[in-house]
Structures are given as C-alpha cells and as structure tokens.
Image (spheres, coloured by chain):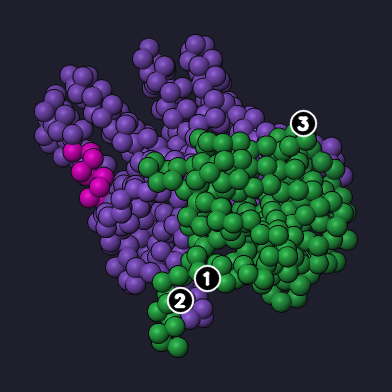
C-alpha cells in the first residue's frame, strides 16, 4: 500500500487494490485451515447450483438476474458508501468495476455452459448496480413510524429494505404458485427466500445493542432465534402450503419446513458465533449453506452439518459471553 | 466562493431546510451554529452533493469545478475500513483523487497519530485528527468541518484552532460547525445561526458579543422566563 508505486496508481486501481488488500487481511484472520475447509464447499455448491440452473432455458436467464439482485442487496448495505462519496467524486465507476469483477466467475461459467446471452446480460447488469441508491439514502425512512417490532426485528427491517425483500416475496409466491405443478418451483422459491434471510443476518449490529438488551448470552440467543424463526416461518408458510398441496405431499412439505427452519437457525447462530467479524461469520454462513445444499453428495456432509449444529451454538454463547461482558464493562467505565 | 442560495430540503413531508442562504468566502472561517436537528448536517450534505432532491442553488462561484472537487469534508463521524492503518487511509484518500502521496511526517509531528496502527481502533479524537490529516495534506481551496472539535482534548483543541487560523490566513475558506460556541466565535469571522431549518441571522465577528444572548432567547425563550422565576 505505501510503496512508491502506489503513487502512480489510478483511483480505480487504487480502490480495487485496497479492497483486495483488506480482503486478504480479513481472510488471514479467518485462518488458512478454515479457508481450505470452506472455499471448496462454496465453489462446489455454487458450481452445482449454476450447473442445474443453466440446464433449464429459463434458469439460464434467472442466473444474471439473481446475481445482480445479490450484488444490489450487498450494495445497498455498504457501510463505506458515504465515505467513498466524500473521498472522491468518481467513486461509482470504481464500484462498477468491482461488481463486474465479482460477477466474472459466474460470467465464465455461463459462457462455458454456452449461455452467451445470459453472460452478456450479467456483464451489463453487474456494473449498473453501482448506480443503485444505497439503503441509507432512503431518507424517507428517517420519518417512519416506530414500533416494538421494528426495534426488535431490526435485522428483518433493514434486510428487507436492502434486498427489496418486500417486493421480491409476492413475486416468489406468485411464481411458485404459477408453476406449482412441479414441486421444484416452491423449492426454488424457498432457496431464493433463504438467500434473503441470509442477507438479513449478514450484518453485525453494534455491541451496545447486545448489551442494552440486558439478557444473559443464552437468553439473548434464544430471543434472537425465536424472533428470527418466527419471522422466517411466517414468510415461508405460502411456499410450504404450495409444496404440500402439490405432488410432493404434506409429509414432504413438513420435512422441507423443518430442514429449512433448521438452516435459518444455523445461519442466525453462525452470526453470533463469530460476532462482530462480518467476514468470518458470513463465510461460516456460506459454509453451512453450501454443506446443506451438497448434503446428499457425500456421506461426510451430513456429519459436517451435525458438527456445525453442535459446535455453532456453543461457540455463539461463548462469543456472546465475551461481547456482552465487554460491552457491559464499557458502559460501567463510561458511567 | 461556496454559495448556497435559497436551499430547501424535505424528507417526505418533513421540511428540514427552508430557504437557507449562506456564502463561504476564500480566506474566511464561517461558523454554522444550531441545535441538534436544526439542519446543519443536512445543509453540509446538500452543499457537498451527498444529498439529492433539494431545491435552490449550490455552487462554487467563480470556479469551473464542482464543490466536491475543490472542497474537503471532515464529517461528524468519519468512516474507517476495518484493518486499514492510518497511513494507508490517508494514502488511499490521496490516491482516490489522483493526487501524489507526500511524506506525512511533517503533519504528523503536529498531530502525533500512530499512523501504522489500524485506524478503526483509534480513539474518537484520534479518528477526528486522522480524517483532518487526510484533508489537510490535499491542499483544498475550501474545507467543510462538521464538529471538528468533538472528542479532542485540550491540547489538540488549541492546536486545531491554530491550524484553522493559519489555513484561513493563507486563503482557504472554511465552513465550521461546532456545539462549543466559545471555540467557534474565537476562530470564526462570521457565523450563521440555523434554527428549525432557517437561517435566523448572519453575524459578523463584531456582532458575536450578542450571539449567546440571541441564541438563548431563540432556543430557550420560555425556559429563560421560567428560570428567572426560580433564580
């Protein structure tokens, strides 16, 4: 960063190198062992998902839309947006390059699968995301009503805003209903909705919010789980009903509901297991999701998921004990 | 000159700025005074182009460049990437505008920052000084500083006042907000008082003597009457 070559860098290159540099530092903190464990799973599950999607003619066109939507939901939650706007007038070009580069591996897969049109669409859509309004800029929200639900279920309120989840949900329900003759439609909708839920739990709230609650780590975690699972179940009910009333039957729908909710619970617990390191807990959440998607591919995957199901709650309570303890200590010092 | 003419800004039906006009001239320090929620930060954001959808005119008069190109901003709460050192932060701020990276040692002898430590682990005062360092090394024509004295200790406070005065003397125009009225009137050449989204009055330095009494009357008129019955 501070070498003499740094002085000659164009702003765009300087920004992209900075992002790479920071990613490298955060990855080093996550640790080589975890990365070696994690990356193959993520690559395999994403690869498998893309392979399945690109077989279907509609699926090919859904991939660029899904990737652009994922990028937009990340873009809308950027904590550095205001800083970049303050630091340099031309920052949106940097973001366009960043999003195009992030989309490149998927573009490569689409090209290999001979979905040239979809690849071109993704190459066009990904940079355009940079011009989307970030969530915090929606200032009308400053004057929105307050309620116990908004302050308690803050992950869902901000997550829905960032991912346009409130618009996406009826679209997914509509699509799943339209194609309900095939059990794959509600399943695919549930998977996309799981990504929305994942986005809701991808940001670390300030430590003061954990301490203010005034609960023990176990109570705090239970409260977050009950609320998160309640919201997740309430929004997933239409998909389960569509699945149950279709060819899959009620038994299969119940099984899917249980597995889906268990995954949501693991995603929530994974957040607090590595709180407040967002890179760390997002990677763990990706790992959990990847293993769940690859579950039937190898007998080792169910074992890994079981290990995660036992280990993550223990680690979450341990981390919360440190954090809530620290935060309480901080309050006492200030007082 | 940075100029704001008849600025209006609303969030939904809530009007935050109502016809605000002010000017920041080169070689002067313009203080912006107002209670919390008076609209100071919104005004700064509109002036700097961080807010859209406002009415009125914002311009860098007499210059071909936009406000953001010739003006540095130190926000109320500066942002720092996690795992980025102070030195890397300043380097990036310079590279972001395509500027050469100078030796930071000279400025840092004054500010005494641990530049090789992660910036997000700095104290509030150190963060403010680091954000200030990043704009000081860029030699802007204008500076907008939102509560620059917040979190600074006595020594840093005195030093910052001296830095601001010297910047003014060499021609930089400064727009400054501060809750600390005494500090602001010590350095400013003129001030605008913002009350409920409107400029209540512009003051020249010669008129600062009545500023505190006027502010008390504007912000706490009824409370003052009540206070007189108590004391």
Residue A291 seen in this snapshot: no
User: Label 2 crowding class (10 Å Cα cut-off): few <14, some 14-19, many 20+?
Assistant: few
What separation in Å lies between label 2 and label 1 (alpha carbons)? Answer: 8 Å
Write down the chain letter for disc 1. B
SS type, badge 3: loop
Percent position of residue B171, x then y:
84, 51
Q: As drawn, is A261 to the left or to the right of A209?
A: left
**3 or 1: mark nearer the eye:** 1
* Closer to the camera in the image, B182 or B117: B182
Report, in whole angstroms, how far the alpha carbon at label 3 lies from the one at label 1: 41 Å
Q: Position of residue A112 (x, y in %)?
A: 53, 16
Secondary structure under the numbered disc 1 in the rendered image: helix
Crowding near pointer 3: few (<14 within 10 Å), some, many (20+)?
Answer: few
- Closest to the camera, between mark 2 and mark 3, is 2
- Residues drawn in magenta: A229-237
Counting residues from the start of the chain, the first of labels 2 and 1 encountered is 1
User: Which hue is chain A drawn in?
Assistant: purple
Q: Is residue A43 on the magenta stretch?
A: no
Please state the chain letter of the residue tagged with numbered disc 2 in the rendered image.
Answer: B
SS of the residue under disc 2 = helix
Residue A272, image quadrant: bottom left
Query: Where does residue B225 sit, x and y in percent of width and height?
Result: 42, 77
Q: Is residue B26 left or right of residue A49?
A: right
Residue under disc 2 on the same chain as residue under disc 1: yes
Chain B pictured colour: green
Which residue is found at the position 53% from the left and 44% from the top?
A: B19
User: Which mark identifies residue B64?
Assistant: 3
Out of A191 and A323, give the one closest to the viewer.
Answer: A323
**Which SS type dominates the magenta stretch?**
helix
Query: Any mark on residue B216, and which?
Result: 1
For the residues labelled 2 and 3, the Cα–Cα distance comes to 48 Å
Residue that numbered label 2 is attached to: B224
């Amino acid at each position: 960063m501070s070498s003499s070559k740094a002085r000659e860098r164009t702003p765009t290159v300087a920004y992209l190198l900075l992002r790479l540099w920071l990613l490298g530092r955060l990855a080093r903190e996550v640790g080589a062992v975890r990365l070696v464990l994690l990356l193959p799973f993520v690559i395999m599950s994403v690869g498998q998902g893309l392979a399945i999607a690109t077989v279907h003619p509609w699926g090919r066109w859904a991939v660029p839309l899904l990737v652009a939507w994922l990028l937009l939901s990340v873009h809308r939650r950027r904590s550095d947006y205001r800083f970049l706007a303050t630091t340099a007038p031309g920052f949106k070009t940097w973001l366009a390059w960043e999003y195009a580069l992030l989309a490149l591996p998927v573009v490569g897969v689409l090209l290999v699968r001979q979905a040239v049109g979809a690849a071109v669409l993704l190459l066009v859509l990904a940079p355009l995301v940079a011009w989307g309004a970030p969530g915090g800029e929606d200032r009308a929200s400053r004057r929105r009503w307050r309620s116990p639900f908004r302050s308690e279920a803050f992950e869902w309120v901000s997550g829905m805003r960032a991912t346009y989840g409130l618009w996406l949900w009826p679209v997914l329900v509509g699509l799943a209903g339209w194609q309900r003759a095939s059990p794959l439609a509600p399943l695919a909708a549930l998977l996309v909705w799981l990504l929305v839920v994942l986005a809701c739990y991808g940001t670390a709230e300030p430590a003061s919010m954990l301490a203010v609650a005034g609960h023990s780590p176990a109570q705090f975690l239970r409260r977050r789980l009950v609320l998160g699972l309640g919201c997740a179940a309430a929004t997933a009910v239409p998909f389960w009903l569509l699945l149950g009333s279709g060819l899959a039957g009620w038994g299969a729908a119940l099984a899917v509901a249980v597995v889906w909710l268990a995954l949501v619970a693991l995603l929530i617990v994974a957040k607090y297991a590595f709180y407040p390191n967002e890179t760390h807990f997002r990677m763990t959440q990706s790992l959990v999701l990847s293993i769940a998607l690859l579950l039937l591919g190898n007998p080792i995957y169910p074992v890994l998921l079981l290990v995660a199901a036992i280990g993550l709650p223990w680690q979450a309570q341990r981390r919360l004990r440190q954090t809530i303890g620290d935060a309480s200590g901080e309050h006492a010092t200030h007082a | 000159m940075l100029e704001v003419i008849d600025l209006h800004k609303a969030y939904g039906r809530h009007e935050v700025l109502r016809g605000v006009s002010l000017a920041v001239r080169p070689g002067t320090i313009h203080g912006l005074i107002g209670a919390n929620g008076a609209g100071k930060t919104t005004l700064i954001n509109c002036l700097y182009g961080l807010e859209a959808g406002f009415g009125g005119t914002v311009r860098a008069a007499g210059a071909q460049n936009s406000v953001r190109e010739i003006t540095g901003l130190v926000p109320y709460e500066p942002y720092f990437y996690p795992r980025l050192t102070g030195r890397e932060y300043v380097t990036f701020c310079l590279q972001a505008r395509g500027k050469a990276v100078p030796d930071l040692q000279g400025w840092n002898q004054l500010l005494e920052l641990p530049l090789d430590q992660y910036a997000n682990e700095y104290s509030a005062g150190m963060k403010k000084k680091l954000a200030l360092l990043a704009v000081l090394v860029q030699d802007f024509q204008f500076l907008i500083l939102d509560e620059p004295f917040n979190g600074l200790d006595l020594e840093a406070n005195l030093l910052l006042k001296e830095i601001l005065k010297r910047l003014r003397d060499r021609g930089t125009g400064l727009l400054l907000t501060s809750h600390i009225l005494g500090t602001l009137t010590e350095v400013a050449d003129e001030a605008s008082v913002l009350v409920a989204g409107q400029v209540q009055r512009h003051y020249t330095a010669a008129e600062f003597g009545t500023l505190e009494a006027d502010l008390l009357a504007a912000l706490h008129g009824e409370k003052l009457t009540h206070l007189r019955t108590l004391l």
